[in-house]
Every structure is written in structure tokens, then in C-alpha cells.
Amino acid sequence: MEFLPTVSKDAIEAAGTEDWDFIYTILGPYEDAIEEAEDEEEILDQLSDDQHTLLIYNALYGQVTNGGFLQLIHNGYGQFVFDAVFVEDLQRWSMNETAALVKKAMTIYEENQTLLDQERDLEQFSVLYKQFTAFEPLDAAFYDVMDEEVKRFRNYIEAHLSSFVKIAEA
């Protein structure tokens, strides 16, 4: 069974040209369904590669823009972002700069996984930020490319809209 939420044509039109307004119009029903599900795996197991990429990129963007790759790892998203399939999907979506950054971050993560995967409280996590600076250039580079990459992200979704949502006329 495939999960394909419904979004109204009016909602899509109301999102206009603002990239994240459009993306959240598509993303919102996924987040709602996952949040409301008794077992989120039931929803996640029904998603296509493109739908997974939608969710994972949203997590990548949110985590890196709020606290960098270290926060992404600390909050448990490394297992999804640092995956060769996700990198390939980013490339397929023409998000090559983000794919290159994720590859570099993946290498750093893999070389330091034992240290980075340790459970930490907030104070220990803050200390790690000061001590482990290997991701800082990648965090900065993400900011440099994110606006253009988000446009590519939106363009891919728009070009393949029927893979993400069913459109309701009213």
C-alpha cells in the first residue's frame, strides 16, 4: 500500500512563489499523518524514495540551520541523512551541492562515529560543540548553497507533484 496525502489545489496556489510555503503545503500532510499514527513506521514503510527524500531533506535543512551537522547527529538524524541512497536521491533531484556536503559530513561522521553517537545531556553536547569543530566549514557551506538548493528541491517536487500528493479541486 502506498501513502499519498491529498492537498487542495487552492492550498497549492495560495503557497505562491515562496519556496518553503509551497514545500510545507506538500510536507504538512506527511507530518500530520506521522504524528497522528499509532506507529509511525506504518506510514514510513509506505513511502517511496522521493517521499523519504522529502522528509529527510526537511530534517537535514531544519537541523543544520538550527545547530549544524552536530545537532543533526545528536538528534538522531544521522542514520537517515548519512545514507548513500539519500545522497543519490539528492543528486537525482539536481541538488549536487547539498549531496557533496552530505558526503563530506558522512566521512567525518564515519571517522568519528563512536564519539559522535555517545548519549549526551545538553551540557555535554555544548562542550562537544566547542571541542569538535570539524563540521563548522560544512555548516557554513550549507548556508552558502541552501537558497539555490531549496529552489531545486521545490522544482523537483513541482515537476513530480503526483508522486507526492493527490490534488483535490476544492
Image (cartoon, rainbow, N blue to C red):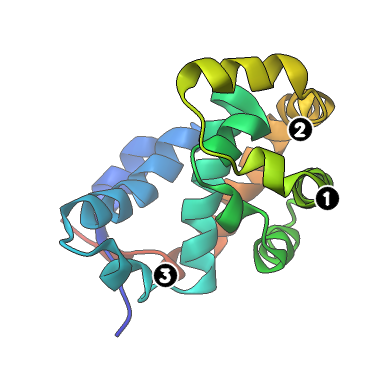
Rounded to the nearest whole Å, what is the CA distance between mark 3 and mark 1? 35 Å
> Tag 2: residue type?
Val
Q: Quadrant of residue 149?
A: top right
Residue to which mark 1 is pinned: 107
In this rendering, would 105 be left or right of 9? Answer: right
Q: Position of residue 4 (x, y in %)?
A: 31, 70
Q: Between tags 2 and 3, which lies in front?
A: 2
Say which of 108 and 85 sits in front. Answer: 108
Whether residue 17 is visible:
no
Residue 145 marker: 2
Left or right, residue 161 beside residue 32 = right
Residue hosting label 3:
162
Q: CA distance from mark 2 to mark 3?
A: 27 Å
Q: Residue at x 58, y 40 (%)?
A: 118
| Kind of residue at disc 3 | Ser
Image check: 49 left or right of 24?
A: right
Front tag of 2 and 1: 1
Q: Secondary structure at mark 1?
A: helix
Callout 3 touching callout 1 (CB < 8 Å)? no
